[in-house]
Amino acid sequence: MKTRTGSIALAIILILIPSLPALAQESDSETITITMTTKTVIEIELEPTNWDIGSIKPEELHTTGATYFTMTNNGNCDLHTYVKGNDVVWSDNPNYKWELSSNGSNGIGIYVLWCERTDYEPIEGLITAEENEFFSNFGMNGGNPKHFGLKLQAPQADYAGGFLAGGEMETTIIISGVAA
């Protein structure tokens, strides 16, 4: 019986030996704090934000040149950008409109709008009422501005009411972006 009690006591002592230094000291720990930004900020800057064409005649073509507008990504992520056009509306009577062409042809009451670029993926692309890719993988933090221009062809003449002379017409182009 003494041997058995001694063996059990020796086993308990052997089990406690690795724990003795831990029991003798206070607990010590260090922490590492990791901070991350998970909020995606999308900020597209356009300069200028206006194109004043002036007087326009039926079927007349107006262009800004391919570097007239500058678009800068001031956000914190790369972007895929998209462009979409709208109908032209008479400021004094919003019921009078020119429809934006969907196929690149003008007509009575239908105008055409294109974008043109030369400094990045050179293209001349049709702008429609449907959202289309504009610049893919657009770099962030203002370090890589993109230049583009616009071309507009007025509707065909229809003096029975399809082309308003002397009216102030306006439209908007929407450029949007999503994180790449």
Image (cartoon, rainbow, N blue to C red):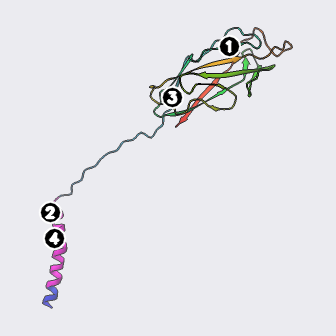
Quadrant of the image occupied by residue 56: top right
Q: Nearer the viewer, mark 1 or mark 2?
A: 1
What distance separates the C-alpha of mark 3 from that of mark 2?
A: 58 Å
| Amino acid marked by disc 4 | Ile
Q: Disc 4 designates what residue?
A: 17
Q: Disc 1 designates what residue?
A: 62
106 relative to 11, above or below? above
Image location of residue 84, percent across then percent down? 65, 28
Looking at marks 2 and 4 on the same chain, the residue that comes earlier in the sequence is marked by: 4
Q: Disc 2 designates what residue?
A: 24
| Amino acid marked by disc 3 | Glu
Could you say which is closer to the camera, residue 60 or residue 54?
Answer: 60
Which region shows up in magenta? 6-25
Could you say which is closer to the camera, residue 163 or residue 105?
Answer: 105
Residue 43, numbered label: 3
Q: Residue at x 73, y 24 (%)?
A: 104
Image location of residue 72, percent across then percent down? 50, 24
| Amino acid marked by disc 1 | His
What distance separates the C-alpha of mark 2 from that of mark 4?
A: 11 Å
77 relative to 58, above or below? below
Quadrant of the image occupied by residue 63: top right
Image location of residue 114, percent across then percent down? 66, 22
